Amino acid sequence: MACQDCDLLCRKRPLRVGEKARCARCGALLYARKPNSIERTLTLALSALILFVLANAYPLLDFRFQGQTLEISVISGVWELYAREMWVLAAVVFVVSILAPLLKILALLYVLLPLWLDRQPWRMARVFRWIETLHPWAMTEVYLLGVLVAYVKLSDIATIVPGVALYAFAMLIVAMAATDATLEPETIWECLETQR
């Protein structure tokens, strides 16, 4: 494998739990073996799924202006863009805020749950590659940033009350980032090789 810092080609060797491989030239971390990687990532992926359901089932914000109250959810933003004939933007918001994160979480569960049970699901290698493909599209933090900017801009002219979904969405971002941090692709591929 190539070092990310200095491009030195290094021979990959199996590591024991807790060991780290470093570049011989610059000392950069190449890869590490984390303890209980599959169990931790599976737990975080299950947490992310629960938070995803909460973030999409409850209102994101309550918008109160001149005696009227409007509940705003993640999907209501997509519907509003679609109703205003902004189909491309509605599709992008739907993919980035709902579809890609859901598919990424479900794909992680599809790969990790059978590995935890010492089984190998159908087309597991392909699904695991899809997780990396979905990663740049599952950008829930960009959507949340847009909501926070709108909150700051509109708070001067209206009363905005954060809903359960806003907190769940923020925790979903943390859970997905933690899932990415604990996921060890080398461990997954090793499990695939040993189960063949």
Image (cartoon, helix red, strand yellow):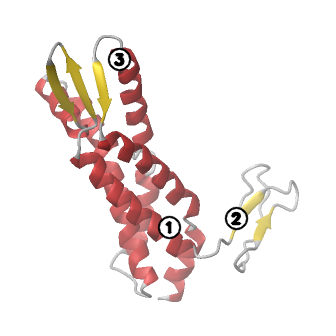
Write down the quadrant of residue 167 in the picture: top left
Q: CA distance from mark 1 to mark 2?
A: 17 Å
Residue for badge 3: 155
Between residue 161 and residue 11, name the one nearer to us. 161
Secondary structure under tag 1 reads helix
Seen in the image, is 55 located left or right of residue 67?
right
**Residue located beneath label 1 in the image:** 41
> Looking at the image, is mark 3 or mark 2 nearer the viewer?
3
Cα distance in 3D space between marks 3 and 2: 46 Å
Give how far across and how far down residue 51 sits, in percent: 35, 54
Pair 1/2: label in front: 1
At horizontal 45% and vertical 51% (from top left) the residue drawn is 135
Residue 33 position, x and y percent, is: 68, 72
Report the label total: 3
Q: Please, what secondary structure does the residue beneath circle 3 have?
A: loop
In this orientation, which residue lies closer to the viewer: 112 or 4? Answer: 112
Which tag, 3 or 2, sits closer to the chain's start?
2
Residue 154's place in the image compared with 138, above or below, is above
Would you identify the image quadrant in which residue 126 lies? bottom left
Q: Are marks 3 and 2 in contact (CB under 8 Å)?
A: no
Kind of residue sitting beneath label 2: Tyr
* Residue sticking out furthest to the right: 25
Quadrant location, the N terminus: bottom right
Q: Residue at the spot x=29%, y=38% of the render?
A: 163
Name the mark on residue 31.
2
Q: Between disc 1 and disc 2, whose residue precedes?
A: 2
Distance between the alpha carbons at the discs numbered 1 and 3 = 38 Å
